[in-house]
């Protein structure tokens, strides 16, 4: 391969910077959305790749959002620059988790580090996972989960940050839309685990998309599990795409059910926009959920 001439490399970098600056100016020119203020909106960065974080942060701020989430702490300065928080993030991936005893040490280390970083930045939540079943029976995995989360609970309490266990669907075989063999693929089991840990700082991440796929009956489960919900995610079913009339979830009553149940945390929009105008898709999702 021929090396890229330094001058061309600098020029391409300047063009990229100009493009982001142009997007930034456009975002800042947009009027702030007249949100009702009852739903605390957030957006997940990974779904909008390859959009630069700077561009998404500017658009989110212009819309009236308070957070861009699932952002590595190394990028917190970008959020701080725009007056945004990171509603939830983590330091280990979903393929590792507390269901297996041999993975406890690594998960404890990762969660402890993230809890410290969250407290320092002002993030309210850290995400954690069960990992995959890999032949593990339900009761053994449940006990391992409880024992493992108890190892981190005291530190979460000390830092004043929620550690949120995410339930993921195991039915959809498409990457990042489903997670076959994931252990905590049941919201009732996930809530039972966090209740058994017995800490006010160990909660569940209630992802409406995953709950709909595995169970349905979303509003009843919100009402049943409200005290243990630390964070919420949205996306359309099927497909994990836009919150539009091509998907089956009726989000406004779900948002009202959250408010009626006393939920005060963020609602993170974690859908993958179908069309080229990703910011328009985000604006639509916010409008649909802003009850």
Image (cartoon, rainbow, N blue to C red):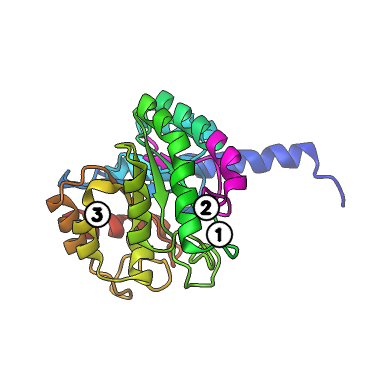
Which sits earlier in the primary sequence, circle 3 or circle 2? 2
The answer to whether the residue labelled 3 contacts the one labelled 1, judged by CB atoms less than 8 Å apart, is: no
In the rendered structure, which segment of residues is drawn in magenta? 85-109
Q: Nearer the viewer, residue 174 or 9?
A: 174
Q: Residues within 10 Å of mark 1 (few under 14, many from 20)?
A: many
Q: CA distance from mark 3 to mark 1?
A: 23 Å
Corner quadrant of residue 162: top left
Question: Residue 273 bears which disc, if any?
Answer: none
Q: Nearer the viewer, residue 227 or 253?
A: 227
The answer to whether the residue labelled 1 contacts the one labelled 2, judged by CB atoms less than 8 Å apart, is: yes
Residue lying at 39% horizontally and 74% vertically, measured from the top left:
238
Evaluate whether residue 81 shows in this view: no
229 up-or-down from 77: above or below: below
Magenta span contains residue 101: yes
According to the image, label 3 marks what residue?
225
Picture quarter with the C terminus: bottom left
Residue 277 percent coordinates (x, y): 42, 60
Question: Residue 99 bears which disc, if any?
Answer: 2
Residue 237 percent coordinates (x, y): 36, 71
Pair 3/2: label in front: 2
């Amino acid at each position: 391969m021929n090396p890229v001439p330094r001058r061309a490399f600098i020029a391409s970098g300047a063009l990229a910077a100009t493009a982001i600056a142009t997007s930034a100016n456009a975002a800042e020119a947009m009027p702030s959305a007249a949100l009702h203020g009852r739903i605390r909106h957030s957006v997940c960065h990974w779904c909008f790749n390859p959009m630069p974080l700077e561009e998404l942060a500017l658009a989110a701020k212009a819309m009236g959002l308070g957070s861009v989430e699932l952002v590595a702490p190394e990028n917190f300065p970008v959020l701080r620059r725009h007056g945004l928080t990171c509603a939830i993030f983590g330091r280990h991936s979903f393929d590792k988790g507390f269901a297996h005893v041999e993975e406890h040490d690594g998960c404890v280390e990762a969660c402890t580090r993230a809890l410290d970083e969250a407290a320092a930045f002002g993030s309210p939540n850290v995400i954690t996972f069960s990992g995959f079943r890999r032949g593990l029976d339900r009761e053994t995995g449940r006990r391992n989960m409880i024992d493992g989360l108890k190892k981190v609970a005291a530190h979460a309490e000390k830092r004043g940050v929620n550690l949120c266990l995410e339930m993921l669907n195991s039915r959809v075989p498409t990457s990042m839309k489903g997670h076959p063999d994931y252990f905590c693929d049941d919201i009732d089991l996930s809530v039972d685990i966090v209740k058994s840990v017995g800490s006010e700082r160990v909660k569940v991440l209630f992802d409406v998309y995953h709950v709909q796929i595995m169970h349905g009956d979303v509003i009843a489960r919100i009402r049943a599990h409200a005290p243990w919900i630390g964070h919420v995610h949205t996306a359309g079913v099927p497909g994990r795409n836009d919150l539009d009339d091509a998907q089956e979830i009726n989000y406004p009553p779900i948002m009202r059910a959250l408010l009626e149940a006393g939920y005060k945390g963020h609602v993170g929009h974690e859908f993958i926009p179908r069309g080229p105008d990703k910011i328009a898709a985000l604006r639509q999702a916010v409008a649909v959920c802003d009850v």
